[in-house]
Amino acid sequence: MRDTKILKVQNINNSSKELDEAAAIIAGGGLVAIPTETVYGLAANAEDEKAVTSIFEAKGRPQDNPLIVHIADLTMLTRVVREVPQNAMKLANKFWPGPLTIILPKSSFIPAVTSAGLDTVAVRFPKHPVAQEIIRRANVPVAAPSANLSGSPSTTSAQHCIHDLMGRVDAIVDGGDCEVGVESTVITLAGETPKLLRPGYVTLEQLREVLGEVLVDKAVTHQPDPNAKVSSPGMKYKHYAPKCKVILVDGTQTQYADYVNSHHTDGEFALCYNEDVPFLRCPSISIGAENNQAEQAVKLFDSLRRLDEEGAQVVYARCPKQSGVGLALYNRLIRAAAFQVVHAASGTEQV
């Protein structure tokens, strides 16, 4: 059991002591939950094998699930990777700092535990000023998966981190709620053709505008081979799931409402859009307006956590569109539902 400190940082200009303390803990081999623009990350020195191992222990995370390394400037990138190809610089110039992770051949400074034994490393330059400042002051690249218990919904507020990690980490930096709300987009440049491994706020369409051809890994929308070795977080295991059972329901608003109303019993909830609520006869939690994907991304994980707080046993989640940021929402929800989708019109299930 660790004595977890809560370090409140509302403004980096007025919180030098707290920032220094968080950075010193990381530089000294400790664990700190830090805010980023996507979700909170559980940060440790990416070059310290023992510190990185403690991330897996604190989260209960399988060690074959690679971590993302966070940097605070492009000079730090050359410390983390062996080479920086032209496509990487195109993406960095367009999207960094921001919610995009790029997979590249790793340098010798990154231990095998950080990359799950792979010869590649996932790297991101976060936009959040608190994350940037802590990394700069620690003066080391920082491995930082989502600051939650493995498999549960990601954390988008300090309170979420306190709920999951109090006593498991050395400090939690309270920097307010996250702006984006879903984890970063992950693209690999390690193969012949760029490939999307995890969708996020930087969309597939935006990536193709910069790079041209971008493939989409089958695991973005389908369950991967359980024995496969994955090169990105969030590909292999059931993720993002509340304690209740999640059933993903695909259909129009009318089809969705009809299906939920004809199937729900006590203890069952709907996870839906604002426009769906008037048509549902069971308790509902909305993730925002149907045509506002940015709002949905911000609310998704908090809504999944609220379901547990409300005592939901089963939730019927309306299936998002698989375009734009909607692909990221679909990717998270299909994993929360253990890859099971019900087609509302026919009642048939797809796995």
Image (spheres, helix red, strand yellow):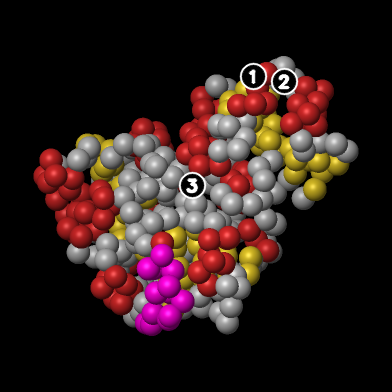
Q: Amino acid at mark 3?
A: Val
Q: Which mark is nearer the camera, 2 or 3? A: 2
Looking at the image, residue 278 sits to the left or right of residue 49; the answer is right
Q: Amino acid at mark 1?
A: Pro
| Closest to the observer, 205 or 66 | 205
Q: Residue at x 39, y 79 (%)?
A: 84
- For disc 3, the marked residue is 182
| Closest to the observer, 343 or 108 | 343
Q: Residue at x 60, y 26 (%)?
A: 274
Q: Which mark is residue 279?
A: 2
Looking at marks 1 and 3 on the same chain, the residue that comes earlier in the sequence is marked by 3
Q: Residue at x 65, y 22 (%)?
A: 277
In the rendered structure, which segment of residues is drawn in magenta?
Answer: 82-94
Q: Main secondary structure of the magenta part?
A: helix
Q: Residue at x 55, y 21 (%)?
A: 310
Confirm or deny contact between disc 1 and disc 2 (CB under 8 A): no
- For disc 1, the marked residue is 283
